[in-house]
Image (tube, grey):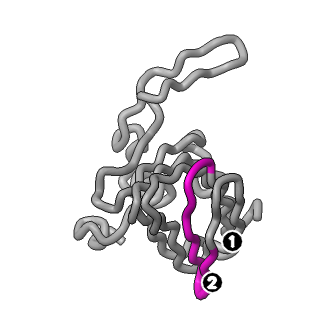
Amino acid sequence: MLSQVERGEANPTFATLWSLTQALDISIEDLVHVEDVQKASRVDVLPRSATPRLGDDGTGVTLWLLAPPEHVGVVEWYELELEPDGHLSSRAHASGTTEHLTVLSGAVTVQSGESTVDVTTGGTARYIADTDHVIANPYNEPARALLVVLGSEIS
């Protein structure tokens, strides 16, 4: 995976980054810039500028990690922006992992294993993610979506 990332052939998931930080005994905050969270008595507010973000790697996809980093691998949720011809290609996650993708605007295709479906605004695709899978925008308009990844213990 690391050599694919270095060659620009893969986009690391936050789960991959989390695993790397654990192996290196560093915090995920050491890899992604996280600003201070505004704290209230029962509500934490994380400004957009402080939301961990992946992108600008030539795939036409930007991801914001909306889940707390300590939930990576169990339950994760992301906001995705896919430019026209953008794609997010992922290797198989742990056995039993599923993804749930809701398109907020535009349209995308989802490929999981041998199955490919189109998902338009308002639609939700639920699919296994323990096989190679791709979210792509083959259309001429940008697309936005929410992606929830459920680890095997939740799925």
For residue 31, which numbered disc appears in the image?
Answer: none
Q: Which residues are magenta?
A: 104-117
**Left or right, 108 with reference to 4:** right
List x then y, in percent, for residue 71. Answer: 61, 47
Question: Which residue is at the front of the view, 26 or 150?
Answer: 150
Assign a secondary structure to mark 2: strand
Total labels drawn: 2
Rendered residue at 70%/11% (across/down): 41
Q: Is residue 6 left or right of residue 136?
A: left
For residue 44, above or below residue 13: above
Quick one: label 1, few (<14), some, or many (20+) residues within 10 Å?
some
**In magenta stretch: residue 108:** yes
Query: Chief secondary structure of the magenta span?
Result: strand
Q: Amino acid at mark 1?
A: Tyr
**1 or 2: mark nearer the eye:** 2
Q: Amino acid at mark 2?
A: Ser
Please name the residue that numbered disc 1 is placed on. 127
Examine the structure image and report whether residue 78 is included in the region drawn in magenta.
no
- Mark 1 and mark 2: Cα distance apart in space: 9 Å
